[in-house]
Image (spheres, helix red, strand yellow):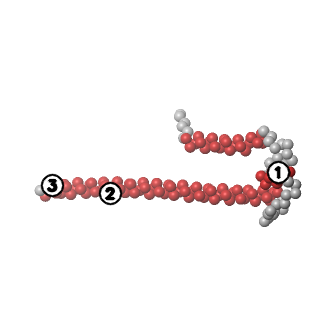
Amino acid sequence: MSFTVSRNTKINTLLLLVVAALAVLPLALGLGDHKEEPFTGADAEAETAITELQPDYEPWFSPLYEPPSGEIESALFALQAALGAGVLAYYFGVRRGRRQGEARALAKASETAVVAVVAETAAGSASAAVGDKDA
C-alpha cells in the first residue's frame, strides 16, 4: 500500500515541529536557570535594564489597571491571546469560505453554460432536420 503525503501536509508538519522546538528547547537547555524568575516578560526585563543603567529614572506613565496578582495578570494575558487567535481564525475562515463560494459559483456558471450550449446545439440540429424535411 502506497501512502503519499501532499506538499501542504509536509509544510504543516515542519512548522509544527519548529513551534514545538521553540517551546521545548529553552526548557530542555536550561536557559534562564541562573535568574530568580527565569521566564519573565519583556516589560520586567526592560525595567530591570533601565534601573541598572539609571537608578533615578522615573517612568512617564503609570498603568491604567494593575492586576492584584501575577496569576490574574497571566490569565488576562491568556485571554487577550485567545481573543486575538479567535479574531484571526474568524478572518481566515471567512476568507476561505468566500474563496470556496466563488469557486462553486464559477463551477455552476460554467456548468450552466455547457448545458445551454448543448441545448442550443440540440435545438439547432432539430431545426435543421425539420428544415431538411420541408425542402
Kind of residue at badge 1: Ala
Mark 2 is surrounded, within 10 Å at the Cα level, by few (under 14), some (14 to 19) or many (20 or more) other residues, namely few
**x, y percentage for residue 21?**
70, 41
**x, y percentage for residue 126?**
22, 56
Label 1–label 2 contact, CB within 8 A: no
Q: Secondary structure at mark 3?
A: helix
**Which of labels 1 and 3 is toward the front?**
1
Mark 3 is surrounded, within 10 Å at the Cα level, by few (under 14), some (14 to 19) or many (20 or more) other residues, namely few
Kind of residue at badge 3: Asp
Q: Earlier in the sequence, mark 1 or mark 2?
A: 1
Gap between marks 2 and 3 measured at Cα: 24 Å
Residue in the foreground of this view, choosing between 22 and 110: 22
Residue in the foreground of this view, choosing between 127 and 34: 34
Please give left or right for residue 69 compared with residue 94 in the image: right
Residue sitting at the far left? 135
Gap between marks 1 and 2 measured at Cα: 74 Å
Residue in the foreground of this view, choosing between 53 and 3: 53
Residue 57 visible here: yes
Look at mark 3 in the image and give the residue it sits on: 132
Residue sitting at the far bottom? 64
**x, y percentage for residue 130?**
18, 57
In percent of the image, x 70 and y 56: which residue is there? 81
Look at mark 1 in the image and give the residue it sits on: 49
Q: Earlier in the sequence, mark 1 or mark 3?
A: 1
